[in-house]
Amino acid sequence: MPITFSMKKSISFILIVFQMHLFGQYNEYVKKKLTQIDSLYGIDEELTIQISNELAEYATQHHNDELFVQSQLYAVQLLFNQKKYNEAIVKVKELIETAKTTNKNQLVYCLTILNNFYVQLGLNNESDQLTNQILNLYKGENSSNAYLTKGNIYISKIQLLTSYSEFNDLNLDEQKNKNTILNYAKKAYHYYNKIDSSNQNYLFFKLNGLNTMHLAYYNLNNVDSTIYYTNQLKYYFEKNNQLKENKLIFFFYYFAQGRTFLLKEEYSKALFYFNKALKNIEYNSSPESKMYLYKDLSKTYTYLSDTLKNKEYTLQYFHLKDSISNVRNNIRNAYHDEIIKKSQKRESEKYYGLIISFFILLLLISLFFIFYKKKKRELTDQTNKTLVLNNLDKLLELAKSNDILFQTTFNELYPEFIAKIPTFLTEDEIKICSMIKLNFSSKEISQYTFTSIRTIENKRYRIRKKLDLDTKTKLNQYLKNL
């Protein structure tokens, strides 16, 4: 089964549809650039990319994410056409992240392009996940965009199934696979038929749906249904002159006619149409379609007993198949290697994250203990300070009441002071020194010891003499400093 023409060409239709959707929103400069891109696409790739980048720069300057994504969609497709597959996939993934901030339709366009890349590269699992995501985005929505997208999704599912079987040399004759393909084809045809007939590309997708049904029934060897859908293709093709100008549609129309006659065992007519398709093959950029055409030509020449031509197209078929297979395998390997590297990087980051977390935890525990010890010390100091203040209050009361326990209590509270007092002072002189230490004035000492102020002054004088203090040194200050 050849690739349906939507898988290659529908991307450019998607880009055109999206451009038309946005065209009226932009100023003349942007409209001019978009028109230039559309005109040059497929003709001058280098100039197309240059204009796309200019438009992207303009969009960045004006903070227009929607225009930025639109400007780069063509460039992404051109990268893929230039076989820069990884670069194209990385780029479109970046555009998808940007499109998430714009609108659903633009996001779906980007996801659809990425899915087409996956399909063409045979990345089946990635495509399956992406198609389900796209279908969920349009779940329950009735619009031309939704129908077009859903139709394309089921086309991609058909290609995935047939391509996987072809490149893995699996037998596609199982009834289950054939019925699955027919089921997908019916869904694609159903959604394409629901596209508004006023849509500029309605006929293109109408033909795509018919072609898909033709291929599904051809795969089932159902002659009558194959002929029916081939005739429907012929009807719409011959009815619309605009379609006749599209060389790509020419290719698929002739290809479908050739397969129909091959199924009817009219091999000369089949060869006639296959050769017409071969003349238009240059307008089809899909190597898979060329590969299937070579395969059917080889088969036709076998039935016509032309060994030389059979060998020629068999070799071309296998040569192209091996080439496509090698590209796919290299891309898949590179893609999976990238996934492994990312996984290893995540594991490495996780490992270093655990180490960092451990040291942060250790630091927090250390800080907690430092904080705990500090608070404990502050609490002890506060308790001691409170205790000292309480004892000081008690000591002052003892002094004021001239209690005999005053000196004993003072000695306990200020042991260092007492140790520095010369031993040659009398007990009475030591008591006077203790009260001076507590900041009592001579008058207060006189009052609390029931002696005259003169007596206290004389005692202070004798203490100065014994301590050998000069006239400049005040007794109060000296004692406080002890």
Image: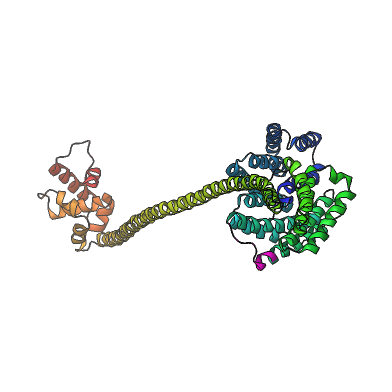
Q: Quadrant of residue 401?
A: bottom left
Q: Quadrant of residue 52?
A: top right
Residue 463: say if magenta: no
Q: Is residue 82 above or below residue 225?
A: above
Labels in figure, total: 0
340 or 188, which lies in front?
Answer: 188
* Image position, residue 256 (x, y; %): 77, 53
Magenta residues (range): 169-178
Q: Is residue 460 above or below residue 157?
A: above
Residue 101 appears in the picture as rendered: no
302 or 443, which lies in front?
Answer: 302
Q: Is residue 430 left or right of residue 15?
A: left
* Image position, residue 19 (x, y; %): 77, 43
Q: In the current view of this chain or complex, which residue is farthest to the left?
A: 424
* Image position, residue 167 (x, y; %): 59, 54
* Image position, residue 406 (x, y; %): 21, 61
Residue 312 appears in the picture as rendered: yes
Q: Is residue 411 above or below residue 327?
A: below
Residue 170: say if magenta: yes
* Color style of the picture: rainbow
Q: Quadrant of the N terminus?
A: bottom right
Q: In the current view of this chain or complex, which residue is farthest to the bottom?
A: 176
Q: Main secondary structure of the magenta part?
A: loop
Q: Is residue 480 above or below residue 124?
A: above
Q: Is residue 315 left or right of residue 452?
A: right
- Name the residue at 62% across, 55% down: 166
